Amino acid sequence: MTVHIGARPGDIAETVLMPGDPYRARWAAQTFLTDAVLVNEVRGMLGYTGTWRGHRVTIHGSGMGMPSLSIYANELIRDFGAKTLIRIGSAGALPTHVKVRDVILAQACSTVGSPSRTIFRELNFAPCADFHLLSKAHAAATARGTPVHVGGIYSSDTFYDERPDLTEQLLRHGCLGVEMEAAELYMVAARHGARALAILTVSDHITTGEALPADQRERSFGAMVEIALEAALG
């Protein structure tokens, strides 16, 4: 048990999927895991552990933004022995060839700042995904016919951003999408010797203005969960 995670020793699996929304963690656990058990509900951040094809898996919310994710990722790795952490979340697409409902595999993450910035000081550390997870996720997405894109993303702690100049430069440099957690996940995992990957479903498009209707989100997000499970344990 930690300050933010009320699980007991042994409650958390070595493989952890991390959606931002705790209710999405509950949905994913009830939909994809067998015998899922609630192992954390401190501050309303839900975590469940069950099995997938005989493998133990925990699905635990991270909250919104890098500061929140940093707390849970640190404690899951340091205090509960998590070794593989996969973010399953949504992203806003930037280039027009990336469509709503497509999946983005974040090979690398750019960010203006994260909780790890104070550690690196003047160093511009480049956080990247675990290659083994990345390659397996790409194979899983391709096998199921899910449109998938691999490349760099931008992690921002500002949801209501008003920087059109930054969006322009991100597009110019080939950035695939924008989300709010992956860069810090990759940094924390690197620091503790864990594996990390962000698998993101495009829920809206920053350039075109298109957005996925609320009633279609869970159905579209299901593919992302299956890809994550295949990448970690398939």
Image (cartoon, rainbow, N blue to C red):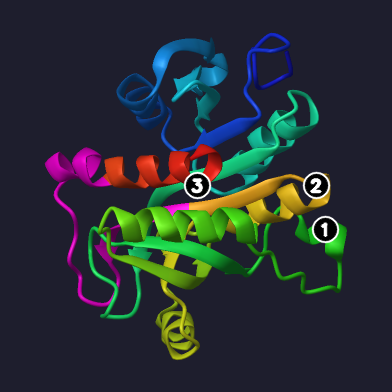
Q: Amino acid at mark 1?
A: Thr
Q: Which residue is mark 3?
A: 231
The secondary structure type at the circle numbered 1 is: helix
Q: Is residue 96 above or below residue 142?
A: below
User: Does the rendering let one see residue 159?
Assistant: no
Residue 118 image label: 1
Q: CA distance from mark 1 to mark 2?
A: 19 Å
In this view, the residue in front, 167 or 134, is 134
Q: Amino acid at mark 2?
A: Gly
Residue at the spot 23% in from the left edge and 63% down from the top edge: 100
User: Does the rendering let one see residue 105?
Assistant: yes
Residue at the spot 27% in from the left edge and 77% down from the top edge: 207
Q: Position of residue 212 (x, y in %)?
A: 18, 54
* Left or right for 189, reference 147: right
Which mark is first along the chain, 1 or 3? 1
Location of residue 69 (image quadrant): top right
* Left or right for 192, reference 66: right
Residue at the spot 30% in from the left edge and 24% down from the top edge: 31
Q: From which residue to which does the magenta span run?
A: 199-220
Q: Position of residue 97 (x, y in %)?
A: 27, 79
Residue 193 image label: 2
Location of residue 11 (image quadrant): top right
Q: Nearer the viewer, mark 3 or mark 2?
A: 3
The secondary structure type at the circle numbered 3 is: helix
Q: Quadrant of the N terminus?
A: top right
Q: Nearer the viewer, mark 3 or mark 1?
A: 3
